[in-house]
Image (cartoon, rainbow, N blue to C red):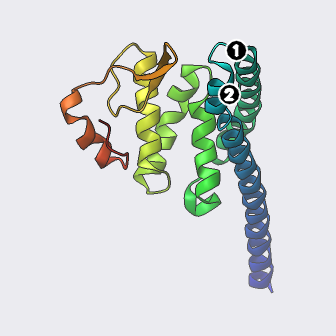
Amino acid sequence: MKSILSFSILLFVLTVNGQNLDSIRIELEQLELASIQLRNQVMPTIKSYGYQSQEMDSLNRAIMLFDSVSLVKVRRIIDQYGWLGKSEVGESANRALYLSIQHAPDSAIREKYFPLLKESVEKGESDLSAMATMYDRMLIQKGQKQYYGTQSRMVNGQQELFPVEDPEELNKRRKKVGLGKLK
């Protein structure tokens, strides 16, 4: 009888945990989709109205508002459950964790959560390219050259790569982390 009760409690805990992860997965997938939909409007808006247009300013404000709300949710999830891997919540939800932290306005947030992303990558639970992209962003924000060539900026309406460490070896490094070749 005691073993049946223990098994029932274990089954209940696993079911509740599964429901929690399932609802978290859905929430994160919705965040990723909304982020993509907002960001997919950037280039068409620039082409139609210009980079410094009122329409682009409105879109940037909408993206910043979305990112701040998303960040609150994602930080709550990571602080409670850790960096949830692909096997726990799926690729899309796992990517949403990365995107939210990557787009955080404060570099200290990336510095705080980067070790968790790195650990998840080392376990095969997150994408190496996500870690490389966040690493580059952290380097740029420290005034250093990026390593993987993932970060660019707008200069005179054109995208320009931030300076890169050892540019001759850039494409070899990119290939190792699953990123495509740059010219």
Q: Secondary structure at mark 1?
A: loop
Q: CA distance from mark 2 to mark 1?
A: 9 Å
Residue 29: numbered disc: none
Residue under circle 2?
Answer: 45
52 versus 158 height, above or below: above
Assign the N terminus to one quadrant of the image: bottom right
What count of labels does the image hold? 2
Q: Position of residue 172 (x, y in %)?
A: 23, 43
Q: Residues within 10 Å of mark 1 (few under 14, many from 20)?
A: few
Q: Considering only order in the chain, which callout, 1 or 2, is on the residue closer to the N terminus?
A: 2
Residue under circle 1?
Answer: 53
Residue occupying the point 47% across, 42% down: 130
Look at the numbered discs 2 and 1 and tell me whether their residues touch, using CB distance below 8 Å.
yes
Q: Residues within 10 Å of mark 2 (few under 14, many from 20)?
A: some
Assign the C terminus to one quadrant of the image: top left
Q: Secondary structure at mark 2?
A: helix
Residue occupying the point 77% across, 58% down: 20
Tell me which amino acid carries mark 1.
Answer: Ser
Q: Who is closer to the viewer here, 92 or 151?
A: 151
Tell me which amino acid carries mark 2.
Answer: Thr
Q: Who is closer to the viewer here, 149 or 84?
A: 149
